[in-house]
Amino acid sequence: MPRPRVYVARRLPEVALERLRAAADVAVWETDEVPPPREVLLRQAAGADGLISLLTDPIDGALLDAAPRLRVVSNYAVGFDNIDVAAATARGVVVTNTPGVLTETVADFAMALMLATARRLVEADRYTRAGQWKSWMPMLLLGPDVHHATLGLVGLGRIGAAVARRARGFAMTVLYHDVVRREDLEAELGLGYVPLEDLLRRADFVSIHTPLLPETRHLIGAAQFALMKPTAILINTARGPIVDQRALYEALRTGRIAGAGLDVFEIEPVAADEPLLRLDNVVVAPHIASASVETRTQMALMAVDNLLAALDGRRPPNLVNPEVWDRRRT
C-alpha cells in the first residue's frame, strides 16, 4: 500500500513531525512568519490524504472540493472556527482538534494578563528601561489589587474552570455566566451563577472563555462596556471577535473601563497601526496563551495522533464531527 500524503501548514515540534514521517510522506510549510498563501494551501491539499491545519488556515468548501483525496483535517487548536465543519461533514472528511491539553497553560496565561494589566507591569518595564525612575514614589504606577477582587468569567468550560481554580488562590469572589449552568462546579469552587449583565456590573475583572460562535460574535460591545465599572479590566484569551474591538478602544480611551489584557484580536496578526496599541492601559500578546514548550509539544503530538488514527481506519480520539465516522461504520 502506498504511504498516505500529509500536508502540515506550519512547522511543528520535531518530535511530532518525526512521528508523522514514520507513517506518511510529509510536506511542511517552513515559513513561521506567515501562513501558507491560499494558492499554496489549495495546491498542497489537492494531493493530500491528510491535512494538519492551524487557526490561520481557512478550510472551506472550495478547498475541500479541490482535495478529492482528503480524508482528515486535524486542527492544531482547540477551536475550529477556521474550518467549515458542515462542508467537511457533507464531503465525508473527518475533522479533529486538540482539546484539554492546553487548558492549564492558557489558564496560567489568563492570570498572567490579569496580574500584568492590573499592576501595570508593561508600563513599569518601559518606564524603568527609559531611565525615568528617579526615586521611590508613593503614587508611582498605582493599580488595583487582584487578591480579594471580584472575577467574572464569561464561559465556564475547561479553561474558565481552570481560571476559577487559580482565582481561589487569590481569595477572589468568582462569578460566571454560561449558556450551560454548572452546579457541580459552583459547589466545588464556590462560584456564583449570574446573568451576563449582572456579571458585568459587579466584576472587577472580566475574563472571556467562551468559544467563537455566531451568537458570541461581538458578545462584548459598547452596551456591555457601559455596564462595567470604570475600574474594571477586561481579559481575553479566547477569540478576538467575541469583543467588538472598536468599542473596546473607545471604552479604554474614554476611561469607560480601566484596562484590558489581550492575547487575541478581531484580525490577526494585529495591524501595526491598530489604535489599541497606542494606549498605555492595554497589555497585548501575539496569541501565545498556549505557548509553553510542554503544551505546544503535546498539542502537536495530539494533532498527529488524531490524523494518523483517521488515516489508519481507527476512530480519532478527538472527533469534531463524529457523524462522519458513524456514517463510515454503517
Image: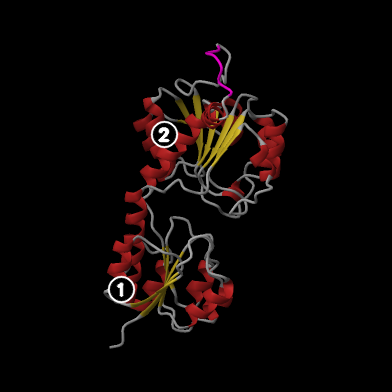
Q: Is residue 221 visible?
A: no
Q: Majority secondary structure of the magenta segment? A: loop
Q: Residue at x 62, y 31 (%)?
A: 281
Residue range of the region highlighted in magenta in the rendering: 132-137
Please tell me whether residue 135 belongs to the stretch shown in magenta: yes
Vertical arrangement, residue 169 with respect to residue 82, above or below: above
Q: Which residue is mark 1?
A: 21
SS for callout 1: helix
Label drawn at residue 164: 2
What colouring does the structure picture have? secondary structure
Q: Quadrant of residue 186?
A: top left
Is residue 300 inside the magenta stretch?
A: no
Q: Are marks 1 and 2 in contact (CB under 8 Å)?
A: no
Q: Quadrant of the C terminus?
A: bottom left
Secondary element type, mark 2: helix
Report if residue 174 is visible in the image. yes
